[in-house]
Image: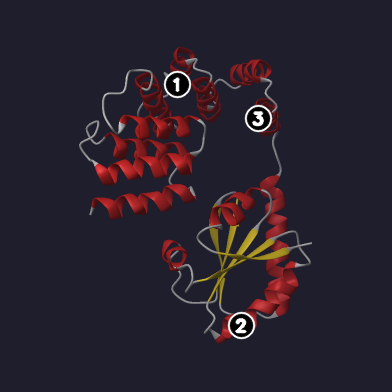
Amino acid sequence: MGTSIEVDSANFMAEVAEKSFEKPVVVDFFAQWCGPCQMLKPLLEKVVQEHDVVLAKVDIDRSPDLASAYRIEGVPDVRVVMQGKMYAGFVGVLPEPQIRDFLAQLTAFYGQLGSKSELESQIEAVQQLIVSGKIQEAKDQLTQIREQNPDNVAIKIFNASFLIGLDELGEAERILAPIYEGTEGFAQAEALRNLIYLKLDSAKPYTHALDEPFFSAVQSTLAADYETALQGFLGIVKQDRKYRDDGARKALLMVFDLLGDEHPLTKEYRKQLTSSLY
């Protein structure tokens, strides 16, 4: 039932972060020279076959950036990733029965975590309509959901983001207006407001050599291709901090706010941004 894969920096996002929204991912940080790691590895590989989980094996010598990002101080260090967030598991070697209990508790907890409320099911239905190209139907349903849940900030942000993609910028601003500084969701709402301004600017004639790559990154942000957007903005930061009054760095911070502090891309590119500045 479970699967085991080798993971490194190149496929960590897809195989761990993204996969964790489908099922729990057990991440085994190990080293080839580590005796206890070699004892634990076959035990994990055996027991995960009994559960609907993914075992992602990370060699810290081949992916030192991952070991550093997640503060791995000793191996074996087993972590758990669920819904895009990493949690502590255990360090060292456990007996097989304890590993089996650990995974049983993990899958049971994930089942509770993954159970959808009626509202979550409604939002998921809207997302399916969007993917299917039924934009007007998705728009009508989302408006209805927002009106039925007038105090739900997350729905307002989702609705505004959707409308920005449809170029309905005035309506998006109206929905975001009640989310002001000091209230829940302000950082994301402010990031979307900044994205609206950038979308308006992108329609103006280009006058600077960096305009094209900058607004290409803006378009990637609008398309939710956040990694491409972050790469583009970071490249401009490295070239010219004066461009648009440090606009590329501000755009990076905007995307960080959209994603949230705990998102793997935020952590990865915040570190890269810091390195490029100092």
Percent position (x, y) of residue 247? 28, 34
Q: Residue 38 carries which label?
A: 2
Percent position (x, y) of residue 201? 34, 21
The type of residue carrying mark 1 is Leu
Res. 2 in view: yes
Residue found farthest to the bottom: 35
Label 3: element kind: helix
The type of residue carrying mark 2 is Gln
The type of residue carrying mark 3 is Gln
Q: Which numbered mark, 1 or 2, is in the foreground of this view?
A: 2
Q: Residue at x 57, y 52 (%)?
A: 17
Mark 3 highlights which residue? Answer: 127
Label 1: element kind: helix
Mark 1 highlights which residue? Answer: 176
Q: Residue at x 46, y 67 (%)?
A: 67
Residue found farthest to the top: 170
